[in-house]
Structures are given as C-alpha cells and as structure tokens.
Amino acid sequence: MSTSSSRTATAVRSLADDVRSRSDEQLRTLVRRRPDLARPAPSDLTSLAARASTRASVQRALDGLDRGHLQVLETLVVSGDPVDLPVTAKLLGTSLRSLDGFVRELWDRALLWHSGDGDHVVRAVSEVLGPHPAGLGPAMAELPGSAPGWSTSPGELDAVIASAPAGARNILDLLTWGPPVGTLSPGGPMAAAGDWLLSHQLISALSGDHVALPREVALQLRGGRLHHQSELTAPTLTFNAHKQPSVDDAAGGQASELLGLVDELAADWGPRPPRVLRAGGLSVRDFKRLASTLDVDSAHAAFVVETAYAAGLLADDGSLEPVWAPTPGYDDWQQRPSAKRWIRLSRAWLASGRAPHLVSAAPPGGGSPANALSGEVVYPPMRQLRGDVLAELAALPEGQAPDLASLAARIRWRRPMRRAEIIEAVTAAVLREAEWLGITGRGALSTAGRFLFKGTADPAAAEKAINTHLPSPVEHVLLQADLTAVAPGRLEGSLAQFMRLIADVESRGGATVYRFSPQSVRRGLDAGWSAAQVLTALQDASRTPVPQPLEYLVGDVARRHGQTRVGSVLAYIRSDDTTVLDTMLADRGLAALQLRRVAPTVVVSQAHTLVVLEMLRENGFAPVAETTEGGIQIPRVAHHRTPARRPPATPTTTSFVDDELTHTLVTALRAGEESAAYERARAQSQPGPRLPSTEPAVALAFLREAAADSLGVWIGYADADGRTTRVLFYPRRIEGGRAYGSVEGSNVERAFSIHRITGAAVS
C-alpha cells in the first residue's frame, strides 16, 4: 500500500511506535482528522498515541466516518489481525487499488497502524463496533464444540445448506444479516428445525436456549459479501434548479421577515415578560400566546425564540421570580443596520447546539413534550448535523436546491452511526430553519449563506451580499376604509412602535396588514395619546387620507374614553353621566365588584383599582384611572430588560483545529518526544526500573496492550500513605477504573486503581 512509505527502519510494535515514525505533515493530518486529540494538548507523541487509542476518542473518530470508510473498517476487522487486504477487497466486492484510498484515510486517522507483518486495526475499534461487526457472529474456532466436517471445504458447506429443510432455512435467513444470536426454545415450534441445524453444526448452542450463527456460515449465506449492499460512494442528489438572483431575493425577504418577528417578540415581552418555569423554559400557554402574537405556527415560533436566545437578545432576568425578557444587548442590536442584525442571528444559529424542532414534539420514548428555552432542547450533535446539511448545499452549483429525501439519504451515508429517524427529522428541520433565516432561498444556498458558511467564513462579504437583497424599510402606510392599514414593506423605528400600539397585526407577508379596533385605539389613548395626536400621526404616516370610518372610530372611542374615572377608596367610580353609573349597577357581569352608589355621580367598590378598571373594560366600558388631584393617570409602559450579561455560552466543540494550532502542537510534541526519549534512555542506563511520569491515558494504553498480549508492564503505584512502589505487573483485565492481574512471583489476583499509577513502561 502507499502508506508503507511512512515506516522507518525502526521496528514498529504498536500504535505509539507508528505515531512516532510519522512525519510532521502526517502528524498535522492526524490532528486535523481527529481534533479531539489536540484538546488538551498532549505532552509528547506517546501521550498522543495513547489518547488516540482510548475508547472515547475512537468512538468520536468512528462518528466522523462516512458509511464507505466504516464498511471498509468493519471488513478489515473481520479479515483478521494483521488485516488481509485481498480478503477485504473480496468481501467488499472491489479491487485492491480502489481500497488503497480508504486504507490510507483510516491510517491518517490512526485507526490503523503499520508494522513489519502488515496493518493492524486499533484494538479499541473492535470494542466500539461491538462483538458482532457488520452483523457477523463469532468464528467457528471461538464457539464450543469440535470443528465441523464442512469446515475445510466451501463446497461441502453449500451442500449442507442446500439440504436444509424449510424450517431450518427460515432460521438461517433470520440470522444471516444479523443479529447473529437468537433464542430457540427446546419445546417450541422451531425446535425440530433447530435440532437439525445444531446436528449439522450450522448453528452453535451458547446456552440452554441461545444459539449463534458461525461467521463462516453467515459469509457463505451472504454470497461472500460482508454487507447487504456495498456503499463505498455517496448516493447521488436530486435537485431543482433556480436562478441565483431569485434565490437571493427570496432569502432577503425571509431575512427581513425574521428581523421583524424578533422585534415583535421583544415588543411583546418587554411590557409583559412571561415567567420562567420552575424547571426552566417557557410555559406551553405563554408559548402558544407568542405564536398567536407573531401569527406563525409553533415550529416557526420556536425557531424565532430559540434563535433570539442563542444570539443573546433575550434571557431570564435572574430575579427571585424570574421572567423571560429582552436583554440590554437587544437595544444595541436593534439600532444596528439590518444586514449586521441578520449576521448576528445567522452566526448564532450556526453555532448553536440547540434544536428548535424538538419544541412541543413528543419524545420517542414517551413523556411530555420539550418546552422552548429549556434544557431539553439542547442536542449537542445538532451543530455537526447542521454543518453536514449546509456542506452538501455548499457543494452544489449555485441555484440548485436538493430534494429532501435524497439529501437525507446523503446525510445518513455521511453519519452512519446516527439513527436514521433522527437524521430524517434533523435534515428537514435544518432546511426549514435555513429558509426562515435567509441562509437559503427556494431551497438553495443564498450568496450570503455561502459566504457565511464556507470554510473561511467572510461575514463582511455575507453582510454586503444580504444587504443588496434585503427589502428597504418603508416609512409610510396606506390607510383603507375598512379600518385597516397596509405597510408595503418592513416598518422600523418610531412608526413601527406607533403602529404596534394603535393597531393589531392581521397578516404578514410581503406587506403587513394592521387592523384598527376600539380596543387597539383605546390602547393608544391609555398610553397618553389624544385623539387629535393619533389622527395627526396617522395622517403624517399615510400616503392616503385618513378614511372617515377611522376618524369616527377614533372620535367615538375618545368621547367615551375617560368619561368614567376610577380611583382608590379602595376604589371609586365617578361619572357626570348618571345613566352610565345606572348601567354599571344593573350589569350582572360587574356583580363581583360589589358596586355601591354614594352620590348621584359616584360609585365605590371594595375591589382594587386595577381590578375595577380591568372588569369595566371587559364589560364594554371605557374608564381611565384618575390621580388624587383629579387628573388622568397615564400608565407607564415598562419595557422590562434583564441585567447586563454575556450571551449564552456556545457549547464547546472539538470539531475543528486551525493550521496555526496544528503547527504549534506538532512542534511541541516533537520537543516533548525528545525529552521523553532522553528520560527513557536515562532510565535504561541505570539499575532498576526508573519510570518516567506518565498520563493516566498513557498508563491505561500500556495496560491494555499488555493485557491483550499477555505481557508484563512495570508500573509505579502510589499507596494510601503516599509511598510509591515499583512492581512488574501482568494485567489480565481492565474494568471500572481498575486493572486486575498478578505481580511477578505471585499468582494471587491484585487490583490497582488507574488514577494511582504514577508511571508505566513495557518490561
């Protein structure tokens, strides 16, 4: 293989020797392929190799393999140790030449290592893959019983299989592609067929009712193939083609709508912040009210609130009775240009480890749905899977929008270790959220999204690209005779705040439709606006005259507004119109207030002033609060803000290391290896076993290797009194943070805690 050129004249006996023999560029490639090895930085190459051979690190490495490389790795494990490349190629149905690139990549990732007798798979790979790689059972030699008569001839095995009765063949078909272990009841309906298979040694008994299909039989039944379908290359994508300008225009419209929705969210939660649940998150009732306020479905509302949270625009205020409210950072964000505001939201979404699509979704195992803004929405693999989907989009030519089914199949091929149903749900969610965000338009990656996502992200270029396609904000509305106003674009600043105060949003889209009602007009009057001020502001903002029905509405509400005044007695109600007071006293809906007339124009109540105001308004009256001097009390509209705080922490990731870090790390590893080599040489030149201090991961790697090869290893061990002793230890098994085995000169099993081992060296 081409990788053999990396070997040196020094004998390679382990992964550590293989790693030490690599060039600087090959070490940099290893760190780039497996970035978890760089954090924290190992002290030398031996520590790097030890960390690379741990189960946790190998699990991460296998998670990063696509289905093609995973199938090759499984086949290498099955082929034996050292691996048999011709057998591997045959089981995969490919050529040795085609296999070379896969083997090279696996060696680059330190999942394989070279020695004089061939290539070896790192032992932890077999542990991660489990006892049944590719659904195969144990080899016949590992099963109890004598070797069958057909073991020396595939032709004889074919003849035995061909003679199997129908029931026996059904059992073989069930076990062929795995799992290879099954239950066979002695008195069950398949007992006779099972006895036939056992007598011909096509299956082997593991216990009273458990049987296993030998590896040789399974491969023969599979026709000499290891996998049901060889998938060494990625499945093709199907897509729809669009013009890139139309993609960018659609993306710009979606980006503009998102900015408006975030403003609506802050405008709603500023005066009326919802409380934080005891377990964290947003209550179902408050979430449904938010979706209704934003006039979007629950999935879209979850995306808006989670993205704003990820961008640090809202948080809980940390008070004794905490509530969700905009942060001071929102006020700063709102004053920035639209393109910069979009960049912040987009980058927060790309870096977020939260999954908005899980909000309100029933968990697969049952239980209550997840609440928005709760810890249940955190899904660490989300960043990686989101990056996979966008990487596929970025690899397509401009304007091409992939089909969901083919894209999900592609992501399943990329991440074969993930459950298929999770891949389906995440792929659909990422495409939907990217469209809402404006990173895509019409299903294809926008120009701004391409700048933002590519390997060396260019936020300045992305900002310029999205700014070209963001609809310009408008500064006017069109008033209509049906008590509506149409904003032919996105409103910003004081006009947007005024329209949210004086009218209710009826529909959104390319244009926003606002509807005026007695309640909305009264809301403006309650905030201190007079009828004349409202009409003047509408006239200034409108390109059309104020319609007569709207003038009548404002005037009618203003005439009734303040006729009735409420003060504290606990509460009193006074009105110059005695008919109004008569109506209140006769209204059954106000019976709970226990109204009592104390004068022709004054009625009192034992209820609190705010309760009286609210109930009167609910029953069709239009009262205002009165000060102690007899003036109108204008309520203060408080826009609650959280204390100043940092944005929510982005989950740490080990998915990327830059070139500068890899260069610095490899230089430090070389220096550390020289120091370690000097210590080893110094230890060998002096009597007795002098053990250099080693990391726990290195000591653990030594012990695993020694246990697998039945070798001894010198260890330094610190006892409970802090004294360190050196013993020659022969480990047999390692579990629960302890190594079990015997020391030289004794057959009594002893246990050593891994964390107390101060140093280790192969004997």
Image (cartoon, rainbow, N blue to C red):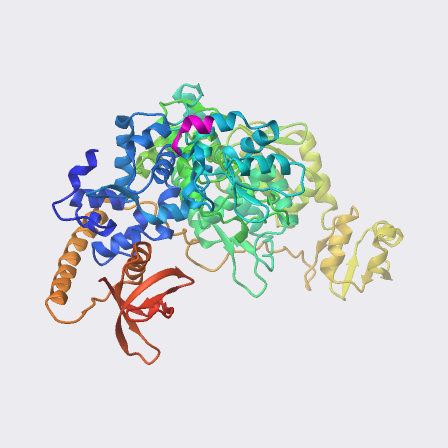
Q: Nearer the viewer, residue 220 or 544?
A: 220
Residue, x 57% and y 53% (percent of image)? 281
Residue lying farthest left?
Answer: 685
Residue 415 placement (x, y as % from top left):
42, 37
In magenta stretch: residue 348: no
Rendered position, 583 above or below 717: above
The residue that appears at 18% across and 45% down in the rendered structure is: 22
Up/down of 671 relative to 450, above or below:
below
Foreground pick, 667 / 735:
735
Give the residues drawn in magenta, as a range: 152-158
Query: Which is more toward the observer, 404 or 679?
Result: 679
- Is 287 positioned to the left or the right of 451 in the image? right
- Across and down, in percent, residue 410 comes to 43, 29
Q: Is residue 707 visible?
A: yes
For residue 132, which quarter of the picture?
Answer: top left
Q: Quadrant of the N terminus?
A: top left
